[in-house]
Image: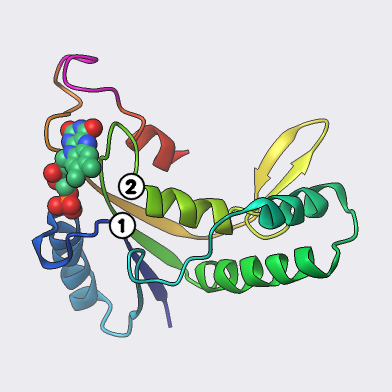
Amino acid sequence: MTKLMFVQSSPRSTESKSIELAQVYLDALRVENPNLEIDRIDLWEADLPVFDGDKAAAKLNAILGSDQDAIQQTAWDQIVGIANRFISADRYLFAVPMWNGGVPYRLKQYIDIIHQPGLLFGLKPETGYFGLLANKHATLVLTSGAFAPSFPSPAFGVDHHSTYLRT
Ligand SMILES: Cc1cc2nc3c(=O)[nH]c(=O)nc-3n(C[C@H](O)[C@H](O)[C@H](O)COP(=O)(O)O)c2cc1C
């Protein structure tokens, strides 16, 4: 069975255009794939821990292969739990409004938590970063109020939104 994770990053719930558009896409997808398993995460309701100094230290230890102390290990275990839920999906549907040229901070916080060495990426000193998720598919549903790719930039804003998410 295919598992799709629906990542909602607008706090506007039933008023949200990005969630509404993504839901239309999802409804059509479910007609074609009736067995699709949906894991919905509302990033404004989810219990996301702050990415603090202990978590940053745990991440750096993981990159460098250094031992974690007890506090860092707890921070790392929390990271792994949240990342594993993400990793367990086969495909992703992201609903993301543009906020100040970029993404809402709850999504950035989520990415900072899950984007970890040995879980989502690896790093080789000779060749650089490489992704660890294979055979996954992601769909982006992006909304903005003033910005549009065809409008003059920077007058109508600069796109750090789609560029960041595609990366
Ligand atoms: C805090 C905030 C910042 C925003 N920043 C921008 C922006 O930089 N550029 C833009 O075109 N629209 C901006 N908007 C408008 C939203 O991107 C737009 O209304 C979007 O459709 C909202 O999506 P939603 O209905 O899913 O919440 C901003 C809205 C909010 C609430």
Residue 21, located in which quarter of the rendered image?
bottom left
Q: Is residue 42 magenta?
A: no
**Chain-order first, disc 2 or disc 1:** 1
- Disc 2 + disc 1, Cβ < 8 Å: yes
Residue 58, located in which quarter of the rendered image?
bottom right
Q: Quadrant location of ligand 1?
A: top left
Residue drawn where x is 13% and y is 62% of the image: 20
Q: Nearer the viewer, residue 1 or 163?
A: 163
Mark 1 Cα-neighbour bin, 10 Å: few <14, some 14–19, many ≥20: many
Q: Start and end of the magenta stretch?
A: 152-158
Q: Residue 41, relative to residue 20: is it above or below? A: below
Q: SS for tag 2?
A: loop
Residue drawn where x is 12% and y is 30% of the image: 146
Find residue 127 and report its horizontal and vertical position in percent: 76, 32
Q: Name the chief secondary structure element in magenta.
A: loop
Q: Residue 97, relative to residue 34: is it above or below? A: above
Q: Is residue 154 magenta?
A: yes
Labels in figure, total: 2
Find residue 124 and report its horizontal and vertical position in percent: 80, 39
Describe residue 48's horizontal placement relative to residue 29 as left or right. right
Mark 1 belongs to which amino acid?
Ser
Q: Provide the residue designation for mark 1.
A: 9
What is the CA distance from the residue labelled 2 to the residue labelled 1?
7 Å
Find residue 44 and report its horizontal and vertical position in percent: 33, 64
Q: Is mark 2 within 8 Å of ligand 1?
A: yes
Residue 79 numbered mark, or none: none
Residue drawn where x is 53% and y is 59% of the image: 50
Q: Provide the residue designation for mark 2.
A: 104
Mark 2 belongs to which amino acid?
Pro
Q: Residue furthest left?
A: 15
Q: Residue 106, relative to residue 87: is it above or below? A: above
